[in-house]
Image: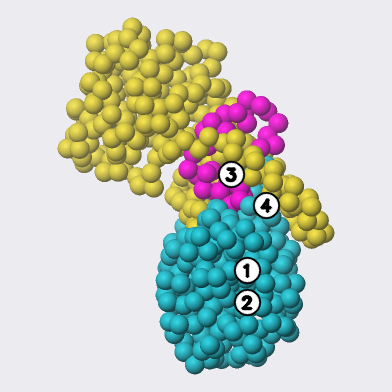
Chain colours: A cyan, B yellow
Amino acid sequence: MLKGLLGNGDSDMQIGIVGLGLIGGSLGLDLRALGHRVIGVSQRPSTCEQAIARGAVDQASPDPRLLANTDVVFLCTPLGMMETVAQQLCPHLHPETILTDVGSVKAPIVASLSLLWTNFVGGHPMSGTAEQGINAALKGLFVGNAYVLTPTSETPVAAVDTVTALARALGSRVYHCTPEVHDRAVAWISHLPVMVSSSLIAACSHEADGAVLEMAQKLASSGFRDTSRVGGGNPELGVMMARYNRDALLAALYQYRDRLDQVITQIEQQDWGSLETHLQATQQQRSCFQFQPQ
Amino acid sequence: MLKGLLGNGDSDMQIGIVGLGLIGGSLGLDLRALGHRVIGVSQRPSTCEQAIARGAVDQASPDPRLLANTDVVFLCTPLGMMETVAQQLCPHLHPETILTDVGSVKAPIVASLSLLWTNFVGGHPMSGTAEQGINAALKGLFVGNAYVLTPTSETPVAAVDTVTALARALGSRVYHCTPEVHDRAVAWISHLPVMVSSSLIAACSHEADGAVLEMAQKLASSGFRDTSRVGGGNPELGVMMARYNRDALLAALYQYRDRLDQVITQIEQQDWGSLETHLQATQQQRSCFQFQPQ
């Protein structure tokens, strides 16, 4: 039964999830707990079976025709597969079905999927763990975390309202902005840190003096551990961020390099007053970030 | 009674602590618990009183003559005051007293204090919290953390043995290396991360588009929180690191900037294979760091 355009947050919608990994599986667990009927689609039959066994879906199969009568479909594949999967999927959907995605970059996804499906709302639930796959799915993964929706001027308002209500029901803080503002914001707080942090690991690890490198590896504690954490993360995900958000990431990298050069110049010139002003400013600026739990 | 040259880890030494802040106070708490008599010296009488009240010292006063019969003296002032304080202190010490310090940079401290006191051993307990002062002192602060000693070819072996035994008795992992190896290692794992991290905060905070900055501040979660943490720390400490470890820090900054430029070039040229190779390497390299608790 199609109820998406009627009931925001209705508890008896039919919800499809395409791509049953960490995010898709976790969505399924929570949406079922909220009373919805959840239908999963994954290429691999074994993943479908695992999702059923874990209670993440009521029903699952590789066949997209299973989603013919869904109110809302969440597209939860990796970024690089979204357009192809949506092309295969859309011919089987009812015209009133709302399609939304969970990709971490929005402008290119919104541009291509809006052409394929009118009733499309770009989304990005900012939740995750270091794990992947259906077996990493968790109940309550989205509670307290940001969930960004990126409607354009052409996105149907009722579709935005329905996805907003679902995201709120998951316990997320929901924000609306344009795809471009989203992508530039996540370039700063998510994608730039990966490049900054991985460059730190690489530079240190190429120290040519073995005694210095060995001592650095022994002495590294919480400061290096935290600054290097995201640079030691999933390589495929890092490349995907850079590919899909290249322009915003490059703009952030150029501004970052300028800042770093200023710090280097201050130290070269022993301009300790300016260095202290810089560090006082960053101590204060950091307090402007909300740092909700993830 | 002077026992330092006799008893490694003896439990009835007279131990002086000059500078009663977080590190000095925490050393006092643990050394007293180990059975030593601890005598504190601080410029401010109110700090002496607080140290006594907290149980960090048996006795305290601004007068360095109190340390005339100590076996070991820990110099725990900020880096910038160490040489001056040592000059005032040394005329009052017994020639057999072992002097050690807790400064986070070693080459300049070891060079100047070795000239003032033959029986000097450079040291760096790598423990700390975000707090400062005697009221932040904690029992067990050093347990499980690195404690580096930096003897030179001229440092008396018995003095190194005594300080080593005391550091082990605090529960630390004790490492010995030259002052120069220490300084280059901490440039990588402690001082460079502060500059990398503060430049990240500064670059992001200067985003000119208010909507993007506001969204970045709302969406920032664990990735940005961790990568920016040490860049939001104590500004005076950051400047002190850069002043005292300038050469090693600049060398690390130049190598870091080269690495960052390579990443920027890979993204500019859409050389995703090389970017993935870089991120795969850093994922593997990070696992070579020990990340003991701090």
A120 lies above or below A53: below
**In the figure, is residue B149 to the left or right of A215?**
left
**C-beta proximity under 8 Å, tags 2 and 1:** yes
Residue A66's label in the rendered image is 2
Specify the amino acid type for callout 1.
Ser
Give residue A78's position: percent from left, percent from top.
67, 64
Specify the amino acid type for callout 3.
Leu
Q: Which residues are magenta?
A: A204-233
Q: Residue furthest top?
A: B6
Same subunit, labels 1 and 3: the answer reads no
SS at mark 2 in the image = helix
Measure the C-alpha gap from mark 4 to mark 2: 34 Å
SS at mark 1 in the image = strand
Residue at image mark 3: B192
SS at mark 3 in the image = helix
Tell me which numbered mark, 1 or 4, is placed earlier along the sequence.
1
Camera sees residue A207 = yes
Q: Nearer the viewer, mark 4 or mark 2?
A: 2
Give residue A36's position: percent from left, percent from top.
46, 77
Q: Residues within 10 Å of mark 1 (few under 14, many from 20)?
A: many
Residue at image mark 4: A235
Residue at image mark 1: A61
Q: Residues within 10 Å of mark 4 (few under 14, many from 20)?
A: many
Quarter of the image that includes the N terminus of chain B: top left
